Image (tube, rainbow, N blue to C red):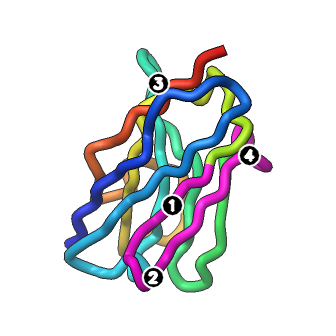
Amino acid sequence: QVQLVESGGGSVQAGGSLRLSCAASGNTISSYDMAWFRQALGKEREAVAVINTGDRSTLYTDSVKGRFTISEDNAENTLYLQMNNLKPEDTAMYYCAARSGWHGFPLRRDTYQYWGQGTQVTVSS
């Protein structure tokens, strides 16, 4: 099992930047597909970015391509999400997630077994 704790959320103005962190314990993140999800009020939780186990390739949802970057530090056992040029529609609770034993469907939230508690991001116009 792996335990995940997010941090780094906050309130920023549109055009600003934030970096979210997800500290993992109990197992190494390189053993898992790692992902960031977000959930806005009244909406379903959606995948934002994924790092795939094995080749560590990355995948982004279209709305954040070119603005967000997912990365990891294996020495620190930490996952990051660098968010630039933030927009009000990025306002949401952001969650770190991990899964193992799956092939394909990296954006499906029901395939992820481990979740953090979330960190709030609020972007004002």
Disc 1 designates what residue?
Answer: 80
**Residue 62 at x, y = what percent?**
73, 42
Q: In this picture, which residue range is highlighted in magenta?
A: 62-82
Disc 3 designates what residue?
Answer: 40
Q: Earlier in the sequence, mark 1 or mark 4?
A: 4
Q: Earlier in the sequence, mark 1 or mark 2?
A: 2
Q: Say above or below: 20 vs 99.
A: above
Please, what is the three-letter code of the amino acid marked with disc 3?
Ala
Q: Kindly report the distance in space between the C-alpha atoms of the residues bearing marks 3 and 2.
A: 29 Å
Q: Earlier in the sequence, mark 4 or mark 3?
A: 3
Disc 1 secondary structure class: strand
Q: Kindly report the distance in space between the C-alpha atoms of the residues bearing marks 1 and 4.
A: 14 Å
Q: Nearer the viewer, mark 3 or mark 2?
A: 2
Contact, mark 1 vs mark 4 (Cβ under 8 Å): no
Please, what is the three-letter code of the amino acid marked with disc 4?
Arg
Disc 3 secondary structure class: loop
Please, what is the three-letter code of the amino acid marked with disc 2?
Asn
Q: Which quadrant: the N terminus?
A: bottom left
| Image quadrant where residue 113 sits | bottom left
| Image quadrant where residue 49 sits | bottom right
Q: Kindly report the distance in space between the C-alpha atoms of the residues bearing marks 2 and 4.
A: 23 Å
- The residue under the point 43% across, 57% down is 21
